[in-house]
Image (cartoon, rainbow, N blue to C red):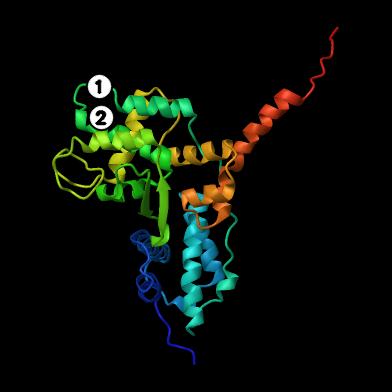
């Protein structure tokens, strides 16, 4: 029996309760869900019955979003709408067939990364003394940057780590990644030493590994980490645009350049789909460049 019609807002709330909340999905997933709803309401100028949502309207919504959003971002929003429609369809609500809502092809991207010597300069810059730059922040920032690079974790994952997760003599730690999935992560000895030296300055009992201000205990935010990375990149004289995620890209690139099996790289990064990890295989092009330069015979033609 077909169920009564719902508004777009009611449809999204039903999905939120029955899927996001029920499955205990992450706050980021719920935030994304709400963002898609707001974009739909903005485009339509208010709420409309979900049954009136046609393929043509979805196509126009897509074109509207593409005016100021990146193709892969728009693709993600359409996928979110599609799963809501699919859920309603399975429950018998009068909605468009979700299979008619095609998923746009992922836009090809080339990720930015640093060379190893640039990472070294970045970490060295974070520890360089300067006026107004406290000893606490120097030790904290050096530990943060080194951990981002050596483990490949995301900015949000870094901010969520508690001090008790880092154990003496153990270079492994477990974080809760995307989809609330636990992931074993690794660091090198040098990074562990930096963390130990930073923690020796801490006199508070706050649970967070990285805090904003000494002795105050407030967990560091994504925005502060972004600012730290940007400022240290400028002090290091790096001409690239460097973000926390750049260090994650660099971690993956370094592994692949050292012939690490891509399946292992996928696990290190916590990717659900290996196609996401394949984004980093552009580094193979660099290997091909070296082989070409070494192996190809150049023909020199004399000119008159």
For disc 1, the marked residue is 129
Question: At which x and y percent is residue 99?
Answer: 59, 72
Question: At which x and y percent is residue 113?
Answer: 49, 35
Question: At which x and y percent is residue 221?
Answer: 27, 46
Q: From the viewer's side, name the closer residue of 253 and 232.
A: 253
As drawn, 244 above or below 296: below
Q: Is residue 274 left or right of residue 135?
A: right
Q: CA–CA distance between discs 1 and 2?
A: 8 Å
The quarter holding residue 243 reads: top left
Residue 57 is labelled as none
The quarter holding residue 238 reads: top left
Camera sees residue 228: no
As drawn, 194 above or below 39: above
Q: Is residue 216 left or right of residue 252?
A: left
Question: At which x and y percent is residue 134?
Answer: 19, 28
Camera sees residue 262: yes
Local crowd at mark 2 within 10 Å, few (<14), some, or many (≥20)? Answer: many
Q: From the viewer's side, name the closer residue of 301 and 175.
A: 175
Q: Can you name the residue that lies furthest to the top here?
A: 304
Q: Residue at left 40%, top 41%?
A: 187
Q: Considering the numbered disc 1 on the image, is that residue within a helix, a strand or a loop?
A: loop
| Cβ–Cβ under 8 Å for marks 1 and 2 | yes
Rendered-image quadrant of the C terminus: top right
Q: Considering the numbered disc 2 on the image, is that residue within a helix, a strand or a loop?
A: helix
Q: Earlier in the sequence, mark 1 or mark 2?
A: 1
For disc 2, the marked residue is 138
Q: Is residue 48 left or right of residue 167?
A: right
Q: From the viewer's side, name the closer residue of 248 and 237.
A: 248
As drawn, 49 above or below 295: below
């Amino acid at each position: 029996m077909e169920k009564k019609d719902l508004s777009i807002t009611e449809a999204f709330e039903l999905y939120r309760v029955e899927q996001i909340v029920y499955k205990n999905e992450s706050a980021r997933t719920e935030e994304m869900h709400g963002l898609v709803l707001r974009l739909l309401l903005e485009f339509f100028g208010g709420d409309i019955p979900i049954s009136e949502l046609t393929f043509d309207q979805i196509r126009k919504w897509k074109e509207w979003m593409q005016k100021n959003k990146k193709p892969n971002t728009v693709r993600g929003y359409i996928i979110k709408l599609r799963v809501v429609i699919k859920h309603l369809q399975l429950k018998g609500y009068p909605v468009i067939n979700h299979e008619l809502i095609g998923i746009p092809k992922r836009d090809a991207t080339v990720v930015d990364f640093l060379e190893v010597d640039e990472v070294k300069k970045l970490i060295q810059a974070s520890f360089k003394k300067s006026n107004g730059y406290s000893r606490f922040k120097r030790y904290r920032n050096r530990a943060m940057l080194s951990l981002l690079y050596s483990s490949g974790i995301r900015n949000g994952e870094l901010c969520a780590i508690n001090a008790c997760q880092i154990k003496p003599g153990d270079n492994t730690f477990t974080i809760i990644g995307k989809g609330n999935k636990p992931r074993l992560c690794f660091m090198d000895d040098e990074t562990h030493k930096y963390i130990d030296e930073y923690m020796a300055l801490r006199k508070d009992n706050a649970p967070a590994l990285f805090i904003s201000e000494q002795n105050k205990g407030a967990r560091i935010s994504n925005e502060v980490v972004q600012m730290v990375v940007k400022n240290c990149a400028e002090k290091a004289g790096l001409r690239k645009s460097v973000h926390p995620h750049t260090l994650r890209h660099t971690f993956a690139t370094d592994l692949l350049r050292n012939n690490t099996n891509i399946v292992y790289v996928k696990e290190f990064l916590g990717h659900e789909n290996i196609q996401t990890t394949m984004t980093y295989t552009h580094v193979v092009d660099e290997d091909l460049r070296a082989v070409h330069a070494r192996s190809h015979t150049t023909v020199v033609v004399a000119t008159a």
